[in-house]
Image: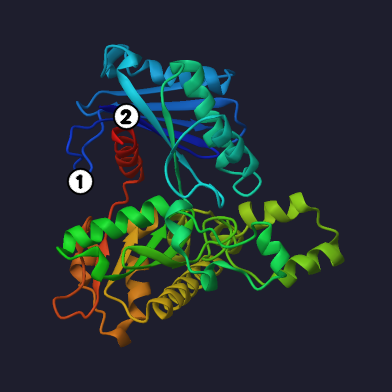
Amino acid sequence: MKILVLNAGSSSQKSCLYDITTPIPNLAPQPLWEGKINWTQDQNQAEITVKTATGAKLQETLADDSRQVQFAYLLSTLINGTTKVIDNLSAIAVVGHRVVHGGEDYQEAVIINEDVKQAIAHLCNLAPAHNPAALAGIEAIENSLGNIPQIAVFDTGFHSTLPDAAAIYPIPYQLVEQGIRRYGFHGISHQYCANRAAEILGQDLQSLRIITCHLGNGCSLAAIKNGCSIDTTMGFTPLDGLMMGSRSGSIDPGILIYLLQQYNYSSQELDNVLNKASGLKGISGVSSDLREVIAAKDQGNQRAQLAWDIYVHRLRAGIGSMLASLAGLDVLVFTAGVGENSPGIRQAACEALGFLGLKIDADKNQHQPIDVDIATSDSTVRVLVIETQEDWAIAQKCCQLVQQ
């Protein structure tokens, strides 16, 4: 079964094509084809890159075309030219989409119909950088592939098991009844990494207390017990929790009241400050990319050093709160761009957990470990670096739903 997966963001559209045989394998196979559209900052140009399992590559820049035209071109590389991997687009059996926010109504993967599309659209104001992009991808598939089955897999779904004490904010209860609560995000990644951790360790997932650290441009933690999410750092929106690339994470809500009252900030200005001008970017003044912040720090940039220090402090504090929810810890997992590629962040996070008996092997930590345990043999907590496979997890759910 050939499954096309779309993972949409505000400035990019990642796609891949899997050919899945039954039974569905646990480990992610190499995609037949991977395609990506990056839109430039002014949105006028689309940088298209494609690679295939056979090693074929393509790079193109399209200008002044609609996103629908750009996406149709990307799909055409599946059947034309050096990157051809199938004879006809009709060979694709189903298309899966990562949808960031599913609200209270969508906790499992669903086949997309008009009701689902309307629900995704209704939640756009809660995930403005992602839900609109997912809708655009759904419509692009309708335009390019017609009536093919499409499936939405929701990032919020894994966190639907949060107990009320963790999910409900201490606000007037009528607001809770209006759907204002902690939803949590990165759920596809957190769930995949928990399952993969159990596989790597050869243990039953139900027996493990796991903290998964999804650290990328967006960052979140999850506390996982009996295979279920029982706490997480992101909240009503993906803005809550840890310090991120350009997002503030948790701050005193009184700051917002102050800015509104004293400086007449508009809602749009607040949104821009908190989502696009804060985090590593806002503190360092250098970049939202941790690699560039580290380079500036190493050259003596004091604001970059401060950005690092705040990032580490908040990461440690977040792990501590997840630890309290679990009442112990068996496995600590690092994943996503920073988690997988920054030995310094892993080291800094783990240094504060020595009181648990957690010890990491400095040599293993430095050598870009993927899907391995970097803890020492005598560590009381296993520490894993896992390559997150969101696209593969989406493909698995699509296959399961189609078979059902």
Name the residue carrying label 1.
27
Secondary structure of residue under mark 1: loop
In front of the other: 84 or 367: 84
Identified at 67% across, 61% down, the residue is 177
| Quadrant in the picture for residue 247 | bottom right
Q: Position of residue 87 (x, y in %)?
A: 27, 12
The type of residue carrying mark 2 is Ile
For the C terminus, give its image quadrant: top left
Instruction: For label 1, count other residues whose C-alpha is less than 10 Å away and answer few (under 14), some (14-19) or many (20+).
Output: few
- Work out whether residue 368 can be spotted: no
- Work out whether residue 263 can be spotted: yes
Q: Is residue 220 left or right of residue 10?
A: left
Q: Is residue 117 above or below residue 175?
A: above
Q: Position of residue 371 (x, y in %)?
A: 22, 56
Secondary structure of residue under mark 2: strand
Please give the label number shown on residue 3: 2
State the separation of the CA atoms marked 2 and 1. 16 Å
Q: Is residue 236 left or right of residue 190?
A: right
For the N terminus, give its image quadrant: top left
Instruction: For label 2, count other residues whose C-alpha is less than 10 Å away and answer few (under 14), some (14-19) or many (20+).
Output: many
| Quadrant in the picture for residue 325 | bottom left
Q: Is residue 12 above or below residue 273?
A: above
Please give the label number shown on residue 344: none
Identified at 31% across, 46% down, the residue is 389
